[in-house]
Image (cartoon, rainbow, N blue to C red):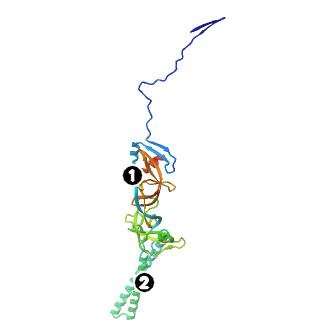
Amino acid sequence: MLTLYAKGMHIRLIFVPIVPAVLLTACGSEPASPPKPPVHSEAVAHETELVRLKLTPEAQKRLGIVTERIGTGTASVMRMTSGEIVIPAGVGGAPINSASNLQQLGLQQVAADGELARARAQLALARVAYDRASALVDEQAGSIRARDEATAALAAAKAAADAAAAQRRLLGPAVASLSNQRYVWVRVPVFGSDLAGLQQGQSALISRLGQDGAKRSARPVDAPPSANAVAGTVDLYFALDNRDRAYRVGQRVSVALPLAGGRSEGLSVPTSAILRDIYGGEWVYARTEADTYVRQRIEVTATEGGRAILSRGLRPGTLVVTAGAAELFGTEFGVAH
């Protein structure tokens, strides 16, 4: 403390020492760090490597991540197109298509059934008339001429009934029973200019449209020629086992036709690893380092036996996600699975 005296004034100054404030922490303790998130995403610059996902081991286990190191393989080169489930051809008839053809067929069958019933009724009456005329002749109560006329009428009625029965057989099974067919045919329109590039006599692979599930083999069959002159296409037919009633008449299906070029060779990945975006782009998730996954663009040349042959997008030995790819996709875009 310092005291100053001035004329008429008494001033006392008090000096207070200023001590800097120091934030102290307890000896040996550190601030608690926040818990590590299960997923960390980091953008990368390449078009084929859009987002790098780093997952904890617990997150990978929860998502069911399984990887496989890819190598080379081969597959038949296929032409992807579409077809329609139809009923196999009847005796001398053309395969039945769907929609309007089924309706038309139903009307024809109703008319044929009516004609057959009428012809059989006429045959029954002609037989009764013949029996009566023959009995009268035997009893010497009738004329031979009447019996001959009855014989001719019976022959005509039998011929008419046989013709009606044959006409009905040409129309195939009743429309109401079409859903119970153990085997169906697949009608595949193909441009006439593309026929030379197909491997003739080989089976096609059939699957539901928009699905990558199991494909069924369908063997080629001979059918009455059919074509669309306006579209410039000819129809190929394949027989498909449908004992489990998985396909219905008129259903559109995906068809893979083998090409004459033989087999394609390249990097092979399981089809379960492939994801497709809304624009048709094909992707897989590759494990680039420990606990790190990157979505990469690929191009598929051919598929066979649950595996796809790639034309570009990966290097030999790359680890790709074969199980849990959809879950990684949802994690990348914030969609729960």
Judged from this view, the residue extending furthest toward the right is 7
Q: Quadrant of the N terminus?
A: top right
Residue at the image point whose x is 44% and y is 50% from the top: 285
Q: Is residue 33 above or below residue 49?
A: above
Percent coordinates x, y for residue 213 in the rendering: 41, 58
Instruction: Please tell me the numbered disc located at residue 160.
Output: 2
Element at badge 2? Answer: helix
Instruction: Please tell me the numbered disc located at residue 181.
Output: none
Near-viewer residue (189 or 157): 189
Decide if residue 115 is in sight here: yes
Residue pointed to by mark 1 = 68
Percent coordinates x, y for residue 265 in the rendering: 42, 61
Q: Is residue 120 above or below residue 322?
A: below
Q: Is residue 8 above or below residue 238?
A: above
Binning the other alpha carbons within 10 Å of mark 1 as few (below 14), some (14 to 19) or many (20 upward) gives some
Element at badge 1? Answer: strand
Binning the other alpha carbons within 10 Å of mark 2 as few (below 14), some (14 to 19) or many (20 upward) gives some
Residue at the image point whose x is 51% and y is 71% from the top: 193
